[in-house]
Image (cartoon, rainbow, N blue to C red):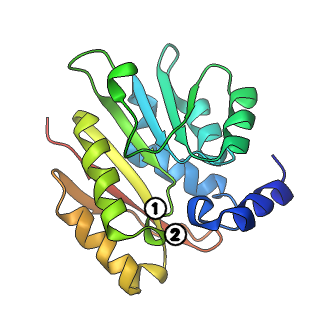
Amino acid sequence: MSAATFAKEFFRNWKTTGAVCPSSRELAERMCEAAQVPRAQRVLELGPGTGAITQVIQGCLPAKSRCLGLELNEVFVRDLHARFPTFDFVEAAAQEYDFSTYLPAGEGFDAIVSGLPWTAFPEELQRSILNHVLPHLAPGGRFVTFAYWGFHQLPGGRRFKELLKGQEGKLTVTEIEWRNVPPAFVYVIERET
């Protein structure tokens, strides 16, 4: 997908697109490494957008592993289906998706990788998504998302970090990835085994 299409979708619906350009390959690689995608059997991607992170997931996901992407933008979903035919994509809100239609009973995701624009969301929506998605993280699994450096000090960024601190599991932060526009770092929540 072209940068022009991405920008068009951003201006058409900035609250769900959340960024004016896709994440850099370097940030996507940092996220996949932090989530331990190369060891995952099941991956959930929240907000795959144009597939910048999806492409890196595809490159390091083991054979026979599965990946589900939840995306609200129908234009992005159509493009993702065409570009990544072995992955599953659903046009759905993360806080509403019925995971029982995808996961076997008692199973979870080994990695949840989020590209959602968290600080553009009201706190109630942030809580709703996390409360609906994180229970489907397998023991020992990891949830990762990124925050733009500097923006994390704004009220919305501080509020989101506090919300992450309150989740079950250990919260850590990676080093800053300077080769992203704007620079970003990754939050990691690791669920206990």
Residue 13 against residue 40 in the figure, above or below: below
Label 2: element kind: strand
Q: Residue at x 58, y 24 (%)?
A: 87
Tag 1: Cα neighbours inside 10 Å, few (<14), some, or many (≥20)?
many
CB contact under 8 Å: marks 1 and 2: yes
Q: Residue 106 appears at what percent x and percent y?
A: 20, 19
The quarter of the rendered structure image containing the C terminus is top left
Q: Residue 79 appears at what percent x and percent y?
A: 75, 36
User: Could you tell me if residue 173 is visible in this image?
Assistant: no
Q: Which mark is residue 146?
A: 1
As measured in the structure, the alpha-carbon distance from the residue carrying label 1 to the one carrying label 2 is: 6 Å
Query: To which quarter of the image does residue 5 belong?
Result: bottom right
- Of the residues shown, which amino acid type is indicated by label 2? Ala
Q: Residue at x 14, y 41 (%)?
A: 192
Q: Residue at x 76, y 57 (%)?
A: 6
Q: Is residue 182 left or right of residue 125?
A: right
Q: Residue 163 appears at what percent x and percent y?
A: 24, 67
Label 1: element kind: strand
- Of the residues shown, which amino acid type is indicated by label 1? Phe
How many callouts does the rendering have? 2
User: Could you tell me if residue 6 is visible in this image?
Assistant: yes
Q: 169 or 117: nearer the eye? A: 117
Q: Earlier in the sequence, mark 1 or mark 2?
A: 1
Q: Is residue 79 left or right of residue 161?
A: right
Q: Residue at x 42, y 56 (%)?
A: 145
Q: Is residue 1 left or right of residue 145?
A: right
Q: Which mark is residue 37?
A: none
Residue 70 against residue 19 in the figure, above or below: above
Q: Residue 164 appears at what percent x and percent y?
A: 26, 63
Q: Which mark is residue 184?
A: 2
Tag 2: Cα neighbours inside 10 Å, few (<14), some, or many (≥20)?
many
